[in-house]
Image (cartoon, grey):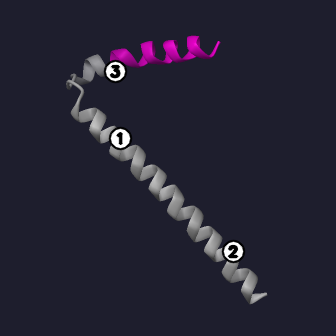
Amino acid sequence: MLELAFRLLDEYDQADAEWRNYVGEKIDAAIVMSEQTQPIDGKTFVNRIPQHFQQTRQATE
């Protein structure tokens, strides 16, 4: 029974490490992209949100 508990703990640790690596890669990619993108003001950003959702909705239809 103890061996099973250790194996499950190892599997959990492995999955957690893989998830952290995946998220870290996404964060790194977002940082690189943000460094290559012109900054915009808050009002412009907020005004673009509905357009983004509309484009996403149209792409999935």
* Vertical position of residue 59 compared to residue 41: above or below: above
Q: Amino acid at mark 1?
A: Ala
Q: Position of residue 16 (x, y in %)?
A: 54, 63
Q: Which mark is residue 6?
A: none
Quadrant occupied by the C terminus:
top right
The answer to whether marks 1 and 2 mark residues whose Cβ atoms lie closer than 8 Å is: no
Looking at the picture, does residue 51 appear above or below residue 31? above
Residue in front for this viewpoint, 5 or 51: 5
Q: Kindly indicate whether the residue at mark 1 contacts the one at mark 3 (C-beta within 8 angstroms).
A: no
Q: Amino acid at mark 2?
A: Leu
Q: Quadrant of the N terminus?
A: bottom right
Cα gap from disc 1 to disc 2, whole angstroms: 32 Å
Q: Crowding at label 2, few (<14), some or many (≥20) Cα neighbours within 10 Å?
A: few
At x 20%, y 26%, the residue is 39
Q: What secondary structure is found at the residue carrying circle 3? A: helix
Q: Determine which residue is flagged by label 3.
A: 46
Q: Earlier in the sequence, mark 1 or mark 2?
A: 2
Disc number placed over residue 29 in the picture, else none: 1
User: Where is mark 2, residue-wise?
Assistant: 8
**Which region of the structure is painted magenta?**
46-61
Question: Label 3 to label 1, Cα distance in Å?
Answer: 22 Å
Q: Identify the secondary structure beneath mark 2.
A: helix
In the image, what residue occupies the spot 57% across and 14% down?
59
